[in-house]
Structures are given as structure tokens and as C-alpha cells.
Image (cartoon, rainbow, N blue to C red):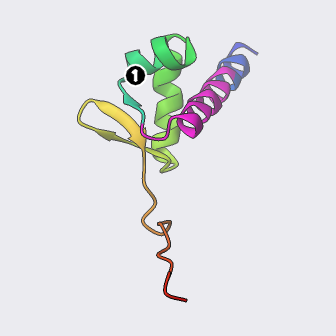
Amino acid sequence: MIHEEQDENVHRTAISILNYFRTHPSAHDSIPGIAHWWVHEDVKTVEKAVGLLVVEGVIEKTGGAYRLKLNPKVGVEKTDSSK
């Protein structure tokens, strides 16, 4: 029972992190920073949630910070303004 509650909390935290990125797409921070400033969760839970998001390929670590992983298949379409 406790394990299921912990897993549920990790998933909720991962969703909270994604929601933060949705409104702040250029944000980047360390696990302690994400825990304290973004989602107000304990560091261990955030560490697990970030781990899930890294495995899924949604975020990446650059230096000491985590940020949204840019999908090279999704880009800005160039429009032909001469038409």
C-alpha cells in the first residue's frame, strides 16, 4: 500500500514538473531547485519523477540542470511570405 502511494506521488510530481515546463518552456534547474521552487516536494520524490521523465526522453540533463528535451522532428515551419 505504501509503495503504491509513493509511486502515485512520483507520477503526480512528474506531471507537476511537466506542467511547469508547459508554462516555462525555457526553464532549467537542479533537482533541489525543482523540488523547492517548482513543485514544493521532497528531493527524493523529485529525483524519482525526473528520472522517469529522463527515461521517457522528455527532459535531459545539461550540466547540473534539467530542461525540456527538444524534439528535432518538431521545428518551426518556415512560411513563404512571397505568396
Taken as a whole, is the magenta stretch helix, strand or loop? Answer: helix
- Give the residue number, with chain letter if any, for mark 1: 31
Q: Nearer the viewer, residue 44 or 72?
A: 72
The image quadrant that residue 62 belongs to is top left
Which image quarter is the C terminus in?
bottom right
Q: Which amino acid does label 1 sit on?
A: Ile
The residue sitting at 43% across, 54% down in the picture is 70
Secondary structure state at the residue bearing disc 1: helix
- Boundaries of the magenta span: 9-26
- Residue 61 locus on image (x, y percent): 33, 39
17 sits left or right of 76 in the view: right
Is 5 displayed left or right of 82 in the figure? right
Locate residue 56, reporting x and y percent. 52, 48
- Based on the picture, tell me whether residue 8 belongs to the magenta stretch: no
**Residue drawn at (55%, 11%) of the image:** 40
Q: Residue at x 67, y 19 (%)?
A: 3
Taking the spot 55% from the left edge, 12% from the top edge, the residue there is: 41
Q: In this view, does 20 lie to the left or right of 59?
A: right
Residue 16: horizontal and vertical position, in percent? 62, 27
Task: Name the one closer to the observer, 48 or 59.
Answer: 59
Determine whether 52 is above or below 3 in the image.
below
